[in-house]
C-alpha cells in the first residue's frame, strides 16, 4: 500500500513529547506552545503567530477577529477544501464562489471583475448589487502549495477596502521570488494567514493550526478569543464569548521538532516532484508546476489526465494499493452551498475533470514513485 500523504516523524519528536510526559505538561500550558509560536513566526517572517487547535479553527478565528459577521459576504474559491467556505458560514456570513486560474488558485482577474461589474463602491463599502450585502473579505487559498498571484489580488483588496485572509494551510514554506512580494512567505501578505498541521500536511502536530499576522493588537486578541476570552484567571471573568481553540503542549512539541526539519522536507518534496515529472514526462503526461513568480513547497503532485481516463486511472491505482485522489468536489456544487452565489465559474470544472493527486509523503521511496509511474504507464497503454 502506498498512501497519499502520511507524517514523517524521525527527528526530535519523541524526545520533545517525552519531555512533556516526564514533566507532566501535556495539556494547554507548558513551554512548547510559546516556543512553537515563536518558531513559526520566525520561519514565516510574520511578526506574531498564535497556535490553535486546527487550520479550520484558525480560519474561523481570523473571520471573527476581522469582524466578519452575519449578513456579510466573503469571496472564496470554488476549488478548495470545504473548510474554507465552512469557516465563513460559522460567523453567519455567506461565501460567494469564484473561479480558478490554470494553477487551480483563485483567479485575481475575476475577483477584480466581480468587484467592478457586480458591486457598487462608495469609497468605503463594497456592496454586492444582487444581494444588497456588504462584501467584506476575500480568502485566497494557496492550492497544493502553489502561491496565489497575490499582487493583483492585493491591489483589488486595497482598492475596494476588503480584508484578505490567506488560507495557507497547504503552503507553509512556499514563497514569492519576484515582484512586490519577493522573498515573502505565503500567509504573510494578507491581514491574517492560516496554517494547518493536520496529519496529511507537509508537517504535522497530529492536528493543529496557526494564525499569523503583523498586527500585534490582532494577535493579542486572537490569543484572548481562542483561549476562552478569560479576563480574570482567579474569578473566571469573561467579557466576551471566546472559543476553546487551544493547541496542547504535546502537539506543539511535535510541531517544534517537525519545523526543525521543514526545509529538508521541502527539498525532498521538490526532488520527488522532479522525479515524477521526468518519468511521466516521457509518457507525454504533465504535472502542475509552480508559478514563474514563486517557489512552491510542492505539498501535492497534481497529474493532469484527460477524461474519461481520470476515474479509470483512480480505479486502477486503488486496485494496485496506491492511494490517489481527484480534486475536491467543487464547493459551489456541494449540498450546503447550492444556493450561494457563484461568479463566472468556467475553468474549475475543466480542472476538476482532469487532476489526480499522486502519493507524495515525505518518506516515499524512489522505488515507490517508479511503481506509481509504472501503473500509470500501463493504464495509458490499455
Ligand atoms: C487542511 C485544510 C484546511 C483545514 O485544516 P485542518 O487543520 O484540517 O482543520 C483548510 N483549508 C484547506 C485548503 C486545507 O487543505
Image: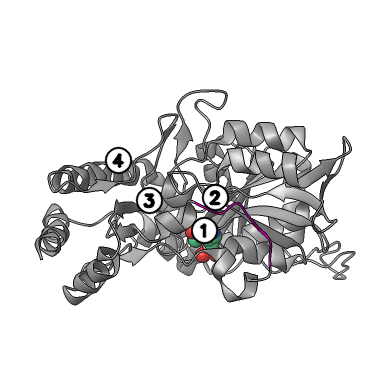
- Circle 3 crowding by C-alpha within 10 Å: few under 14, some 14–19, many from 20: many
Secondary structure of the residue carrying tag 2 is: loop
Q: Do residues under tags 4 and 3 come within 8 Å of each other at their CB atoms?
A: no
- Which label is found at residue 299? 3
The numbered mark, 2 or 4, whose residue comes first in the sequence reads 2
Q: What stretch is highlighted in magenta?
A: 340-346
The residues bearing labels 4 and 3 have C-alpha atoms spaced at a distance of: 11 Å
Residue under numbered circle 1: 80
Query: What is the CA distance from the residue labelled 1 to the residue labelled 4?
Result: 25 Å
Instruction: Give the position of the N terminus as an image quadrant.
Output: bottom left
Label 1 sits on a secondary structure element that is: loop
Front of the two marks 3 and 2: 2
Q: Residue lying at the far top in this picture: please name it.
A: 179
| Secondary structure of residue under mark 3 | loop
Query: How far is mark 1 from mark 3, CA to CA?
Result: 14 Å
Q: Mark 2: is the Cβ under 8 angstroms from ligand 1?
A: yes
Amino acid at each position: 500500500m502506498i498512501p497519499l500523504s502520511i507524517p514523517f516523524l524521525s527527528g526530535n519528536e519523541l524526545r520533545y513529547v517525552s519531555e512533556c510526559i516526564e514533566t507532566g505538561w501535556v495539556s494547554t500550558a507548558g513551554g512548547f506552545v510559546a516556543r512553537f509560536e515563536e518558531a513559526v513566526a520566525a520561519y514565516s517572517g510574520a511578526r506574531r503567530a498564535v497556535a490553535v487547535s486546527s487550520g479550520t479553527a484558525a480560519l474561523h478565528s481570523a473571520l471573527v477577529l476581522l469582524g466578519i459577521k452575519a449578513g456579510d459576504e466573503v469571496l472564496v474559491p470554488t476549488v478548495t477544501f470545504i473548510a474554507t467556505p465552512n469557516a465563513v458560514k460559522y460567523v453567519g456570513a455567506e461565501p460567494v464562489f469564484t473561479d480558478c486560474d490554470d494553477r487551480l488558485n483563485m483567479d485575481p482577474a475575476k475577483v477584480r471583475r466581480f468587484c467592478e461589474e457586480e458591486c457598487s463602491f462608495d469609497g468605503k463599502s463594497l456592496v454586492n448589487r444582487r444581494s444588497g450585502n456588504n462584501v467584506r473579505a476575500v480568502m485566497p487559498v494557496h492550492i497544493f502549495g502553489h502561491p496565489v498571484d497575490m499582487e493583483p489580488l492585493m491591489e483589488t483588496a486595497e482598492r475596494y477596502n476588503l480584508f484578505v485572509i490567506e488560507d495557507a494551510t497547504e503552503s507553509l514554506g512556499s514563497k514569492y521570488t519576484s515582484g512586490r512580494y519577493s522573498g515573502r512567505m505565503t500567509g504573510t501578505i494578507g491581514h491574517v494567514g492560516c496554517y494547518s498541521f493536520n496529519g496529511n500536511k507537509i508537517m504535522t502536530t497530529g492536528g493543529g493550526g496557526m494564525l499569523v499576522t503583523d498586527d500585534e493588537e490582532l494577535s493579542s486578541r486572537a490569543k484572548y478569543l481562542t483561549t476562552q476570552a478569560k479576563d480574570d484567571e482567579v474569578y473566571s471573568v469573561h467579557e466576551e464569548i471566546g472559543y476553546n481553540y487551544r493547541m496542547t503542549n504535546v502537539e506543539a512539541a511535535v510541531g517544534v521538532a517537525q519545523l526543525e526539519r521543514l526545509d529538508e522536507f521541502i527539498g525532498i518534496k521538490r526532488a520527488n516532484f522532479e522525479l515524477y515529472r521526468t518519468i511521466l514526462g516521457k509518457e507525454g503526461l504533465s504535472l502542475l508546476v509552480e508559478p514563474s513568480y514563486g517557489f512552491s513547497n510542492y505539498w501535492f503532485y497534481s497529474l493532469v489526465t484527460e477524461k474519461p481516463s481520470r476515474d479509470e486511472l483512480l480505479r486502477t491505482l486503488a486496485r494496485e494499493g496506491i492511494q490517489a485522489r481527484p480534486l475536491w468536489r467543487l464547493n459551489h456544487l456541494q449540498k450546503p452551498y447550492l444556493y450561494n452565489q457563484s461568479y463566472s465559474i468556467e475553468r474549475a470544472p475543466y480542472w476538476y475533470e482532469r487532476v489526480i493527486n499522486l502519493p507524495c509523503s515525505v518518506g516515499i521511496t524512489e522505488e515507490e514513485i517508479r511503481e506509481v509511474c509504472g501503473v500509470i504507464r500501463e493504464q495509458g497503454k490499455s
